[in-house]
Amino acid sequence: MSTYDYDLFVIGVGSGGVRAARMSAQYGARVATAEEKYMGGTCVNVGCIPKKLFVYASHYHDDFSEAKGYGWLSHQPDFDWTTLLANKDKEILRLNGIYEGLLEGAGVTHFDGRARILDAHTISVGDKQVTTDKILIATGGWPTKQSIPGAEHIITSNEAFYLETLPKRALILGGGYIAVEFAGIYAGLGVQTELAYRGPLFLRGFDDDVRHLVQSELEKKEIALSFESTLAAVEQMPSGALRGTFEDGRVIETDVILAATGRKPAVADLGLETVNVAQRENGAIIVDDQYQTSEPNIFALGDVTDRIQLTPVAIQEAMCFASTQFAGKPQVMDYNDIATAVFCQPNIATVGLTEAEARSQYPAIRVYRSQFRPLKHTLSGSEEQSLMKIIVDDATDRVVGIHMVGAEAGEIIQGLAVAMKAGVTKAIMDQTVGIHPTAAEEFVTMRTAL
Ligand code: NDP
C-alpha cells in the first residue's frame, strides 16, 4: 500500500470517472473522487439521458396523429413543457442519487468541489489537500460557441435542457449529433425549426445514403434545412426575439439560437501547468493505449482526451484502466467497429465503415441496400422511409459496415454490432432466419448486391 492518502484520485464523476473509481475500488484500491458540478456528468445531466427523454416526448406528436389510421379518433392532446421539464428533472435527480450510491457502495470517498492538481501527487479540493499515488482526469467536455457579435444570446445544449418556456421558433447551428437530434425534438414539440449547417450536407462522416435519407425525412417534418449557411451575427430586438444575420446577408427572426457545433475538452483551471501533461492544440489530453499521459502517474480518459466522444466508450476505457492499474490484468481497448446511434427522427444507427470508406480500403466491395416504407405506416399514413444497408468486403465476404435509418435503429444495430465484432460474413447473415414481421428481418433477407 502506498504512503499517499489514496491510491487513485479521479477528477470528474461522469460516465468514465464513476466507472473507473468504482471498479478500481472494487479491485482493492483506496479511491477518492471530486466533482464541482453534477453527479453523473454530461450524459446524465445535460446529454444522453435528458435528450432521449425529450426525443420520446417529441415523438408523441407523430404517434398521436398516426394513431388515427388505426382507429384512435380523439383529438391530439396539448403539450405542456413544464410537466416534461419537471419530470425530466425528477428522473435526473434519481440518477444523481444512484451514481452517488454506486460510489458510496464501492467505498469511494467523494469530495464536492473543484479539484486542482498542485503537483503530480497532490490535489486540492476547496480548502482540503490530499495526496494520491495516481490521478485520473475524467473531466469530459464542454459545448463550444462561435465568437460572433451577439454570441451571448446563443445557447448550447447545456441551457437547452432548462429553458423556462418552449420557444415558438428555433435556429439550430451545426450538422452533427446534437443539431439533428434537437431539430427533431423541437419540430416534434411544435417549434418552427431551422437547422443551419456550414457545409453542403450535414452528418459528415456518416454514410452518404444515410445523410440523404435523413435530409429528406427532416424536410418532410418541415424542418428548414439551410446548408452552406453560416451565422455571422445575432442581436436581440426590443421584443426579446433574436435577429440572426447570415454571412450571405440573409436575416431571420427567431426565439432561440442553439449552437450544436462541437464540444471541447474541459481542462481549464485544472492545474495542468504544474505537471508535465502533454495536450493537443485544443487542450485534449494526450494518452497512450493505457490512458497514461506524459506524466507517468497521471491518466486521462473519456471526452477530455477528445477521441470518440461517446458515453459507452468512456465506460469501456474506464474498465480497461481499472483492470490494468488495479487488477493486474492489462486490457487494451479495441476501438474498431464501435456502433453509434443518432436519435434524430427517424433514428440513425451505424457500425463499421461507410460505403465511401470501404471503397477506399478494399479493392472490391458489395453493397446491399433496402429502402422501404415500414409496415406500420401502411395504416398510420406516415410517409416515413427506412433504410438498411450492408457493406461487404468482396474478397473475404466479411461484413465491414452496417447502417440503418428508421424506428429503433439503435436497438436493432446493437445486436448486429456484436455479430460484426465476431467477424460475421454475408453468408452467415444469409443463413440467419428472419423474425417476421419486423423491419430488422430486412438485414438477413437482402440477397442482391447493387
Ligand atoms: P459534432 O461533432 O457531432 O458536430 C459538430 C457540428 O458542428 C458539425 O456539423 C460541424 O461541422 C459543425 N461545426 C463545428 N465547428 C463549427 C464552426 N466553427 N462553425 C460552424 N459549424 C461548426 O458535435 P455535437 O456538438 O453535435 O456533439 C458533440 C459530440 O457529442 C458528438 O460528436 C458525439 O460524439 C457526442 N454526442 C453523441 C450523441 C449520441 O451518441 N447519440 C448525442 C449527442 C452528442 P463539420 O461537419 O463541417 O465539421
Image (cartoon, grey):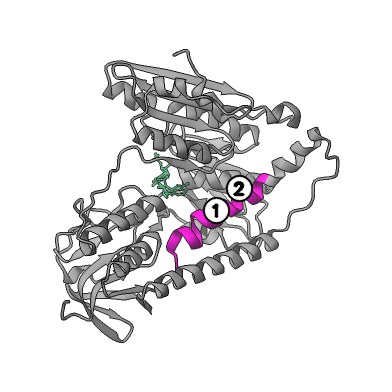
According to the image, label 1 marks what residue? 51
Query: Position of 440 compared to 220: left or right?
Result: left
Q: Nearer the viewer, residue 238 or 27?
A: 27
Residue 450 lies, with reference to residue 103, above or below; the image says above
Q: Looking at the picture, how far across and down is residue 104, in whole percent?
A: 41, 75
- Using the image as rendered, state which of residue 41 and residue 213 is in the foreground: 41
Residue at position x 47%, y 49% from top? 260
Q: Is residue 341 above or below residue 135?
A: above
Please state which amino acid type lies under the numbered disc 1. Lys
Q: What secondary structure is the stretch in magenta mostly built from? A: helix
First in residue order: circle 1 vs circle 2: 1
- Who's the residue at 78% across and 53% down the image? 78
**Residue position marked by numbered label 2 in the rendering:** 185
Relative horizontal placement of residue 6, taking residue 391 as reference (left or right): left
Residue 269 in sight from this viewpoint: no
Dividing the picture into quarters, in which one does residue 119 lie? bottom left
Callout in the foreground (1, 2):
1
Residue 44 lies in magenta, yes or no? yes
Look at the image and give the residue range highlighted in magenta.
Answer: 39-59
As for residue 412 lying within the magenta part, the answer is no
Please tell me whether mark 1 sits on a helix, a strand or a loop: helix
Classify mark 2: residues with Cα within 10 Å, few (<14), some (14-19) or many (20+). Answer: many
Q: Are marks 1 and 2 in contact (CB under 8 Å)?
A: yes
- Alpha carbon of mark 1 to alpha carbon of mark 2: how far? 9 Å
Q: Would you say the beta carbon of the disc 2 residue lies within 8 angstroms of ligand 1? A: no
